[in-house]
Image (tube, rainbow, N blue to C red):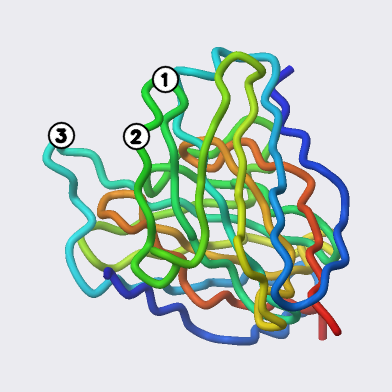
Amino acid sequence: DVVMTQSPLSLPVTLGQPASISCRSSQSLVYSDGNTYLNWFQQRPGQSPRRLIYKVSNRDSGVPDRFSGSGSGTDFTLKISRVEAEDVGVYYCMQGTHFPLTFGGGTKVEIK
Amino acid sequence: EVQLVQSGAEVKKPGESLKISCKGSGYSFTSYWIGWVRQMPGKGLEWMGIIYPGDSDTRYSPSFQGQVTISADKSISTAYLQWSSLKASDTAMYYCAREGGLCWGQGTLVTVSS
């Protein structure tokens, strides 16, 4: 299985400040069609996960533009330019290139 | 509107069987993979397996192969996750999600306790 390693595990952030989450895969996520199937999800307390970013850097409809994704190959990053109170939750990266699909362990974002 | 609606919470005893469901609407059910995801209490997300309702092609994560059965009935746009003999360690929230993860069900809480 492809192992997805996220860091940090916990990220205390001051409101209005930036935040960055790293996700590394144990093998390249470039698929044979040239796409890289790396997605980012947000899970607020008590809610189902919500996709924020697909294929590394594409923001889903309705996702604030303070969220951005970047990276390539095995190294990926989710950035929040200015953290707001509603951003509290756990963030997961997920690879969809190789079966079985796998998630990172999650990063808990909280307000300092 | 694309929606996945899951069946309600279940409380079962060890050794009992269970089948939970996920009904899709607002899109062509047979054209997208549907996956099941486990979230144990206080823990992260784990892919269990995925099914293509168009032809019932099913893939399991090795950790869940032989432990659960994933199926679908395309005539009623519904996917299923079932257990033949539950264990206390199956206690978790279970989500279904459409291919790519854009749409998720609301989750089904399964509690297994004697």
On screen, residue A14 above or below A61: below
Screen quadrant of the C terminus of chain A = bottom right
Residues marked 1 and 2 touching at CB (< 8 Å): yes
Residue for point 81% across, 74% down:
B13
Amino acid found under the numbered disc labelled 3? Asp
Residues marked 1 and 3 touching at CB (< 8 Å): no
Q: Secondary structure at mark 2?
A: strand
Mark 1 belongs to chain: B
The label on residue B57 is 2
Q: CA distance from mark 3 to mark 2?
A: 21 Å
Residue for point 25% across, 54% down:
A98
On screen, residue A69 above or below A74: above
Q: Which residue is mark 3?
A: A33
Q: Tell me the mark number nearer the camera, choosing from 3 and 2.
A: 2
Callout 1 and callout 2 share a chain: yes
Q: Is residue A60 left or right of residue A48?
A: left
Q: CA distance from mark 1 to mark 3?
A: 22 Å
Amino acid found under the numbered disc labelled 2? Asp
Q: Please provide percent x and percent y for residue B98.
A: 55, 36
Name of the residue lying farthest toward the left: A32
Q: Which quadrant of the structure image shows residue B75? A: top right
Q: Please provide percent x and percent y for residue B103.
A: 63, 36
